[in-house]
Amino acid sequence: MQPVRITLITVIAISTGFCYATGCGQNAGGTATVTADAPASRAPPAAANVIVPINSARPAQSLPKPVDPMVVVHTTAGDITLQLFAQSSPRTVENFLRTYAERGFYEQTIFHHTEPGVMLIAGGYTAELQRKPARAPIYNESRNSLSNHRGTLAMIHDADAPHSATSEFFINLGDNSDLDFKVSDDEGVPGYCVFGEVIGGMEIVDRIAQLPTVSQGDFQKIPSPLVTITSIERLQ
């Protein structure tokens, strides 16, 4: 597996799992992606069941609306609260919550790469820099009109394989519109799907991003001391 460095100038080079450009490592080379278990349903979280008589005059706008989930990422550096955009990025939020967070996958994974002013990456490696086996990749929902501005959460995928995201995600430290979906004459240029935003604890994110970094093997900018995700708790 070959992790990579990332810069805004060479966004398209965030490939091979952000491997050559970010030092994060993604599904490439000899890393096997576990596909035996299909990811949980990609349908967006449903609103509470409401039974309305067929002839009811109840106005549609009074019906309960889906609520975007909220989670707290507990880390050894402090807590980070996220609002997840289930209505805008249903498959991606379902994957983050059902396939990984609720199964405890993110526990004891680290923030394994930081690019000051650009992004902070997590969601795939242990403190020993061992890649945790991911499940099947998901469809890229970057056409959702959400932008990679500071504080938003997005998925990592291979630059040449837009539908290859699994568990790894990043928090934007700056406004990275170059990572958004771009309209073109054909199918458009895939971006990196925004599926949430930090609504509490951005100072913790900045504190992690400002830590000194060390290089180990293919990983060039690991925050030091290591910052570990201990658990992810759903609030709503």
Image: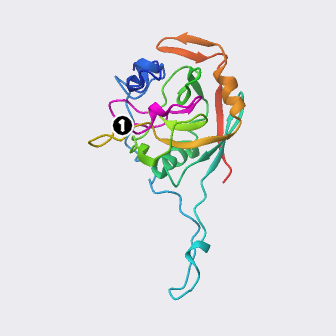
At which x and y percent is residue 59? Answer: 58, 79
Determine the image quadrant of residue 202: top right
Tell me: residue 177, above or below residue 89: above
Report the residue at 39% width, 41% height from top.
Answer: 136
Q: Choose top left, top right, bottom left or bottom right for residue 107.
A: top right
Instruction: Bin the neighbour count of mark 1 within 10 Å (Cα to Cα): few under 14, some 14-19, many 20 and up.
Output: many
**Residue situated furthest left in the rendering:** 186
**Of helix, strand and loop, which one carries label 1?**
loop
The answer to whether residue 22 is left or right of residue 162 is: right
Specify the principal SS of the magenta part.
loop
Q: Residue at x 46, y 46 (%)?
A: 145
Relative side of 169 to 74, left or right: left
Q: Is residue 119 visible?
A: yes
Q: Is residue 168 magenta?
A: yes
Image quadrant occupied by the C terminus: bottom right
Q: In the rendered image, which quarter is residue 205 located in?
A: top right
Q: Quadrant of the N terminus?
A: top left
**Type of residue at label 1?**
Pro
32 over 19 or under it: above or below: below
Quick check: 226 left or right of 24? right
Which residue does the numbered mark 1 point to in the structure image? Answer: 162
Q: Is residue 148 magenta?
A: no
Image coords of residue 82 (percent x, y): 64, 43
Q: Nearer the viewer, residue 65 or 223?
A: 65
Q: Can you see residue 4?
A: no
- The magenta region covers 157-182
